Amino acid sequence: MPSKLYVGNLPFELTEDDLHELFAAHGQVVSAKVITDRETGRARGFGFVEMETEDEAQKAIQALDGQEVQGRPIKVNVAKPREPRSGGGGRGRW
């Protein structure tokens, strides 16, 4: 069963290919996604990597959590499920 990882404190220049390559050294990568700002398209400094198995995910966490990537110590841990968002913002009409 694939295991999804959160990767934080990423360098803003890091690409999805770079992220994939970084984790591929520790197991089979199913997907790698760098999160970008919707308006500017600029990387937001975090992303998600999905590993093939939980064992590979744990190996990647142990190997990469705290490691420097392009001068920044990255944070790697198991991704938490996305919590549901409440309805829109702003003022409601009565």
Image (cartoon, grey):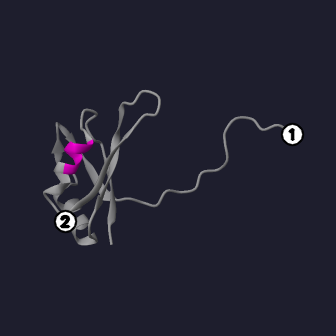
Question: Is residue 61 positioned above or below 70 on the image?
Answer: below
Residue 25 location in percent, x, y?
13, 57
Q: Residue at x 25, y 36 (%)?
A: 11
- Position of 13 relative to 62 (above/below): above
What residue would you read off at disc 2?
59
76 left or right of 18 in image: right
Identify residue type, mark 1.
Trp
Would you call the spot at circle 2 few (<14 residues within 10 Å), some (14-19), or many (20 or more)? few
Q: What residue lies at 46% left-to-right and 61% top-to-bottom?
A: 81
Which element type, helix, strand or loop, lies under badge 2? helix
| Residue 55: quarter of image | bottom left
Q: In the displayed image of the protein, which residue is found farthest to the right?
A: 94
| Picture coordinates of residue 79, whole percent (x, y) | 38, 59
* Residue ID at (39%, 30%): 41
Location of residue 68 in the rendering, given as x and y in whole percent from the top left corner = 16, 44
Which residue corresponds to the image point at 26% horizontal and 70% vertical from the top-left? 53
Which amino acid, by three-letter code, is at mark 2? Answer: Lys
State which quadrant residue 6 falls in: bottom left
Q: Which residues are magenta?
A: 16-20
Q: Earlier in the sequence, mark 2 or mark 1?
A: 2
Magenta run includes residue 18 = yes
Circle 1 crowding by C-alpha within 10 Å: few under 14, some 14–19, many from 20: few
Quadrant into which the C terminus falls: top right
Q: Nearer the viewer, residue 17 or 94?
A: 17
The prevailing secondary structure element of the residues shown in magenta is helix
Marks 2 and 1, how far apart at CA: 54 Å
Q: Which residue is mark 1?
A: 94
